[in-house]
Image (spheres, grey):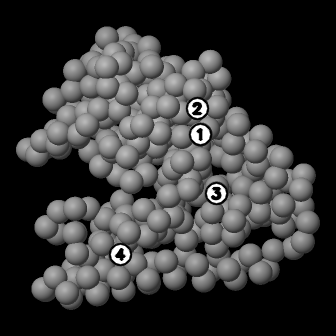
């Protein structure tokens, strides 16, 4: 009960405040703190034969997870019982929940796209996706924004809250450490394939349940098309290159009646990804706003679920 109340408090604070720019300028953010440690260890240890890179990558993962886990356990042990404890815990969990920033980043793509400013929309979408924005037309920008919203709702909001409910501050802190490791070193390229393997495998594991819960929230958030969303999710999610991202993306595609994923370019590299909900139309500018509305409803359902857990 206290862990659910803690997460609901953090969610509410982030909804109202986000992570203020002035605070970020003054102290940074816990994810950037971990990021500096990861970057330093990677620069020192990611060298030599593949076996050495595997071992040192695993060591890096263990160190970073430990740096998140130990203080989180210590703080949680010191929290007072009852409402004061979950209020303090909620404040500490707040930076690790990306509810408002997720909305704001996608809204920053939707606004110029709706006004016909393709260059402005490309610049905004480049902040949240890795593909080459110069190759994206209006439909491609809208598709990239919706896919980012769907995937990052899972690993930026639902997953940290899920692990926070399971284990409190240690749960959410360790999850964010693993997710940050994956985002920095869990890449399938010559530099990171071995060094980041442990981080990538752990990230797949900790997102297994939350990704599917996120897909369910998107389906429930569009009651008229919930059956279609579930059908597309169950049919197409496993076609995605990621074992987890396909679930929320396919559910979003089915709920909105659009096709997502598909071929895309990452710089000079072309990736021929399969379509999710193939045969449906490409998204347009207004569909980004529809996706944001669905996101808001799904997050309201998440908050209601947390509230219900607080009663038991």
- Up-down relation of residue 160 to residue 227 (above or below): below
Task: Please tell me the numbered disc located at residue 198.
Answer: 4
Classify residue 273 by image quadrant: top left
Residue 74 % position (x, y) = 70, 82
Task: Please tell me the numbered disc located at residue 216.
Answer: 1
Residues under numbered marks 2 and 1 in contact, where contact means CB atoms less than 8 Å apart: yes
At horizontal 27% and vertical 18% (from top left) the residue drawn is 138
Q: Dot 2: within a 10 Å radius of its alpha carbon, few (fewer than 14), some, or many (20 or more) residues?
A: many
Give the distance between the C-alpha atoms of the residues marked 4 and 3, in whole angstroms: 22 Å
Give the distance between the C-alpha atoms of the residues marked 2 and 4, in whole angstroms: 32 Å
Give the distance between the C-alpha atoms of the residues marked 1 and 4, in whole angstroms: 28 Å
Residues under numbered marks 2 and 3 in contact, where contact means CB atoms less than 8 Å apart: no
Give the distance between the C-alpha atoms of the residues marked 1 and 3, in whole angstroms: 14 Å
Q: Dot 3: within a 10 Å radius of its alpha carbon, few (fewer than 14), some, or many (20 or more) residues?
A: many
At horizontal 58% and vertical 78% (from top left) the residue drawn is 69
Q: Nearer the viewer, residue 238 or 62?
A: 238
Q: Dot 1: within a 10 Å radius of its alpha carbon, few (fewer than 14), some, or many (20 or more) residues?
A: many
Give the distance between the C-alpha atoms of the residues marked 2 and 3, in whole angstroms: 18 Å
Residue 176 % position (x, y) = 51, 64
- Up-down relation of residue 194 to residue 6 (above or below): below
> From the image, which quarter does the C terminus lie in?
bottom right
Mark 2 or mark 4, earlier in chain: 4
Labels 2, 4: front one: 2
Q: Which residue is mark 3?
A: 162
Name the secondary structure under disc 2. helix
Q: Nearer the viewer, residue 57 or 11?
A: 57
Mark 2 or mark 3, earlier in chain: 3
Q: Which residue is mark 2?
A: 219
At horizontal 50% and vertical 58% (from top left) the residue drawn is 208
């Amino acid at each position: 009960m206290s862990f659910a109340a803690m997460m609901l408090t953090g969610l509410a604070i982030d909804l109202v405040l986000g992570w203020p720019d002035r605070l970020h300028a003054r102290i940074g953010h816990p994810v950037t703190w971990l990021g500096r440690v990861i970057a330093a260890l990677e620069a020192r240890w990611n060298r030599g034969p593949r076996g050495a890179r595997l071992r040192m990558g695993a060591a890096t993962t263990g160190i970073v997870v430990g740096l998140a886990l130990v203080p989180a356990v210590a703080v949680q042990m010191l929290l007072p019982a009852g409402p004061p404890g979950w209020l303090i815990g909620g404040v500490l969990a707040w930076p690790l929940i990306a509810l408002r920033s997720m909305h704001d980043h996608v809204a920053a793509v939707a606004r110029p796209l709706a006004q016909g400013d393709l260059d402005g929309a490309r610049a905004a979408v480049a902040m949240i996706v890795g593909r080459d924005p110069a190759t994206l037309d209006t439909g491609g920008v809208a598709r990239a924004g919706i896919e980012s919203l769907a995937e990052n709702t899972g690993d930026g909001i639902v997953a940290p809250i899920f692990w926070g409910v399971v284990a409190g501050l240690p749960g959410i802190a360790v999850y964010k450490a693993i997710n940050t490791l994956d985002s920095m070193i869990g890449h399938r390229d010559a530099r990171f394939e071995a060094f980041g393997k442990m981080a990538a495998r752990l990230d797949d594991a900790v997102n297994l349940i939350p990704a599917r819960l996120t897909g369910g929230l998107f389906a429930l958030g569009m009651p008229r098309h919930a059956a279609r969303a579930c059908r597309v999710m169950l049919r197409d999610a496993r076609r995605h290159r990621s074992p987890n991202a396909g679930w929320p993306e396919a559910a979003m595609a089915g709920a909105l009646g659009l096709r997502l994923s598909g071929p895309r370019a990452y710089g000079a590299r072309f990736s021929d990804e399969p379509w999710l909900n193939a045969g449906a139309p490409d998204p347009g500018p207004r569909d980004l706003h529809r996706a944001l509305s669905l996101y808001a409803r799904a997050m309201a359902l998440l908050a209601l679920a947390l509230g219900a857990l607080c009663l038991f």
